Image (tube, rainbow, N blue to C red):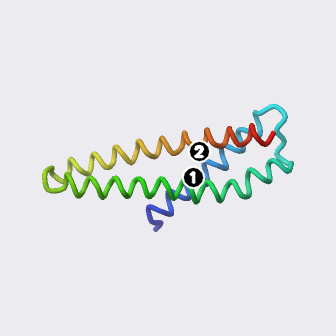
Amino acid sequence: MQSAKEKQIWWAAMIWIASGAYLFATTPGAVVMSKAAAIYFLPGLFAAALFIGGGAWLLQYGIALLLRRYLGAKAPGLVVGQLVSFLGLALWIGETVLIFVLARLTVEALV
């Protein structure tokens, strides 16, 4: 079973690859078999996974710790659990959008 950190990193890498495939297929002048694509996919994949995926995990973990610390004794466990789940979903959507926007900016800069 994967840990939460591994899932965040895996998700960032998969979204980077999917975004790149879509952007290289739809951007005029972008060619998949080019030096720009190699630069996008090889170092970009690792950077996205490490910095965006790792950063998203740290942010989600930090928020969960803060909520548990400040709301844990005051609110029932179900309320805190629902709040953490909602914030986790919001961060997941935000991470996906951020990766796509960064991928689009990267492809546009490389083409």
Q: Which mark is residue 12?
A: 1
Q: Secondary structure at mark 1?
A: helix
Q: Is residue 100 above or below residue 58?
A: above
User: At 77% across and 33% down in the image, what residue appears?
Assistant: 27
User: At 51% across and 63% down in the image, what residue appears?
Assistant: 6
Tell me the amino acid under the disc marked 2: Ile
Q: Is residue 27 above or below residue 88?
A: above
Q: Position of residue 67 (x, y in %)?
A: 26, 52
| Direction top: furthest residue | 28
Tell me the amino acid under the disc marked 1: Ala
Q: Number of numbered discs present?
A: 2
Q: Secondary structure at mark 2?
A: helix
Q: Are marks 1 and 2 in contact (CB under 8 Å)?
A: yes
Q: Which mark is residue 55?
A: none
N-terminal label among 1 and 2? 1
Task: Pick the residue in front: 36 or 92.
Answer: 36
Q: Which mark is residue 99?
A: 2
| Mark 2 neighbour class, 10 Å CA radius: few under 14, some 14 to 19, many 20 or more | many
Q: Is residue 104 left or right of residue 89?
A: right
User: At 61% across and 52% down in the image, what residue appears?
Assistant: 14
Q: Is residue 97 left or right of residue 1?
A: right
| Direction left: furthest residue | 74
User: At 57% across and 52% down in the image, what residue appears?
Assistant: 12
Q: Is residue 22 left or right of residue 1?
A: right
| Cα distance between the residues tagged 1 and 2 | 7 Å
Q: Position of residue 84 (x, y in %)?
A: 31, 49
Task: Pick the residue in front: 96 or 39.
Answer: 39
Position of the C terminus, as image quadrant, is: top right
Q: Position of residue 70 (x, y in %)?
A: 21, 53
Q: Is residue 103 above or below residue 63?
A: above
